[in-house]
Every structure is written in structure tokens, then in C-alpha cells.
């Protein structure tokens, strides 16, 4: 028997706050998580661009809550060695 309509994949919105370990900015991350579709997405610190990874079905939305506290203007750079 064929189902006429597949149920829509409903994700649960996971909202959490974190501080950037590099520049000290604080931001809120909104990630949609779909239980049966484990997936990892990268998001970047809005101030310095340092990358973090969250479990989400799509690229998380990031909202800046507090500007960086290190007093610099540089961008985070991954060390290649
Ligand atoms: Zn940062």
C-alpha cells in the first residue's frame, strides 16, 4: 500500500548560546535538528569567523548577542600545522 502523502519532516529547533573561544563574542545559535537525519553543519562566529560545528539539518542561524571582548579586529585563522 502506498501512502498518498509522506509526512513532512519536522525538525525541532534547537536554540543555544555560546561564547566564542577566540574573541569572546557571545551569540545565539538556532539549529534545526531532524532526529532521523543526523547531520553536522558548520557555523561561524559573527565577529571573527571562527568555525564551529553543530548537529543540524541545515546551516544554523547565528545571532550576535554581545560583541567581541578582546578589543581586536582580526579574523580567526585556522592554524594549518
Ligand atoms: Zn569569535
Image (cartoon, helix red, strand yellow):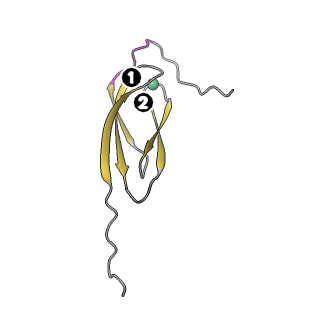
Label 1 C-beta lies within 8 Å of the nearest ligand 1 atom: yes
| Residue linked to disc 1 | 25
The secondary structure type at the circle numbered 1 is loop
**In the rendered image of this protein, does residue 35 appear above or below residue 54?**
below
Drawn side of residue 51 relative to residue 33, left or right? right
Q: Position of residue 60 (x, y in %)?
A: 40, 43
| Apparent side of residue 9 relative to residue 49 in the rendered image (left or right) | left
Q: Which residues are magenta?
A: 66-71
In x, y percent, where is residue 56? 41, 48
Q: Are marks 1 and 2 in contact (CB under 8 Å)?
A: yes
What residue is shown at x 37% (from left), y 85% (from top)?
2
* Residue 43 percent location from the top left of the image: 45, 38
Q: Secondary structure at mark 2?
A: loop
Residue 70 belongs to the span the image colors magenta: yes
Judge by depth and name the residue closer to the eye, 35 or 49. Answer: 35
Establish whether ligand 1 lies closer than 8 Å to the Cβ of label 2.
Answer: yes
Amino acid at each position: 500500500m502506498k501512502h498518498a502523502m509522506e509526512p513532512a519532516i519536522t525538525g525541532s529547533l534547537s536554540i543555544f548560546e555560546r561564547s566564542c573561544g577566540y574573541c569572546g563574542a557571545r551569540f545565539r545559535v538556532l539549529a534545526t535538528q531532524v532526529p532521523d537525519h543526523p547531520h553536522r553543519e558548520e557555523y561561524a562566529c559573527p565577529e571573527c569567523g571562527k568555525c564551529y560545528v553543530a548537529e543540524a539539518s541545515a546551516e544554523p542561524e547565528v545571532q550576535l548577542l554581545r560583541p567581541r571582548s578582546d578589543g581586536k579586529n582580526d579574523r580567526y585563522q585556522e592554524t594549518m600545522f
